[in-house]
Image: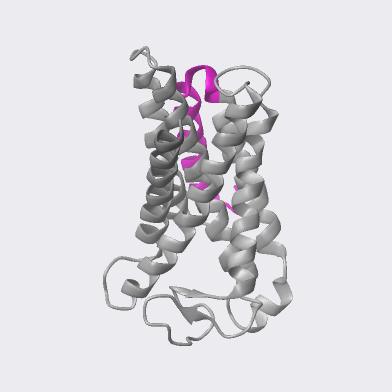
Amino acid sequence: MEFLTLNGYGFVGAVVFGALILFFGLGMGPYFLILMLYFLALSAVVTAIGKRYKKSINQYERFRTIRNVIANGAWPLIMSIAFYFSAGSGSVVLQIAIFVGFVSAVAGVAADKFSSEIGIMDGKPLQLVSFKRVKKGISGGVTALGLGAGLFGAFLISATVFLLKSGLVSNSSLAVVAFACALVGGFLGTIFDSVLGYYESKGIGNKFTSNFFGSAFGSIAAMLIFAAVI
């Protein structure tokens, strides 16, 4: 069984994660789930871009596994669980902050996906920590095109907050703040992911841990920015 960019085990894992996110998301659960499906659809699109070229340099990865699902979905799931328990706090601000954290987490993994899949078609990457030129496909390497694509990926996810006509962010000014925080957090997430990529070559972590902590970093950054602004 295969679905978009997921292999069989990846699909099963995505179903489990999706069900949990839907449950713990309470009233925002449907939005959370749709956002994850939206990310999956966007992933399929950017994976297909430049397919022939990626194959020619041995950088084309058609299907993702359960490990990818865990790396990209674990922090959004944690955020949905946090949202579930925040409902009993009586603090709407806390709930909105966690909502922003969830959106930013997804924006971060989307930014990383766009950055890696589109950036691979740019010139020779620059490693953020060492500032040395590296071969294409090396973890931690970034290009101007990749960074721009990453920002666009984060935008496509973050902009969905404007589609909510009811609930936590139905207020237009609040939606703008939530969007901005999620966008910045998502972009910071992919930058942090690239920084962690440098240490992968040193034997510290791998692309899955980098994805997870990149998502978490961007999410936490977005929540802190939101708390400072509100």
Taking depth in this image into account, of 97 and 227 the one nearest to the observer is 227
Rendered location of residue 98, percent (x, y): 42, 31
Magenta-highlighted stretch: main secondary structure?
helix
Taking depth in this image into account, of 108 and 179 the one nearest to the observer is 179
Residue 16, compared with residue 170, is above or below; it is below
Q: Residue furthest front?
A: 229
Residue 194, compared with residue 91, is above or below; it is below
Q: How many marks?
A: 0
Rendered location of residue 191, percent (x, y): 46, 63
Left or right for 1, reference 202: right
Q: Residue at x 61, y 39 (%)?
A: 37
Residue 118, compared with residue 92, is above or below; it is below
Taking depth in this image into account, of 83 and 37 the one nearest to the observer is 83
Residue 32, compared with residue 201, is above or below; it is above
Rendered location of residue 88, percent (x, y): 35, 13
Rendered location of residue 180, percent (x, y): 57, 42
Tell me the magenta residue range.
Answer: 1-29
Residue 172 seen by the camera: yes
Instruction: Residue 22: say if magenta.
Output: yes
Instruction: Residue 3: say if magenta.
Output: yes
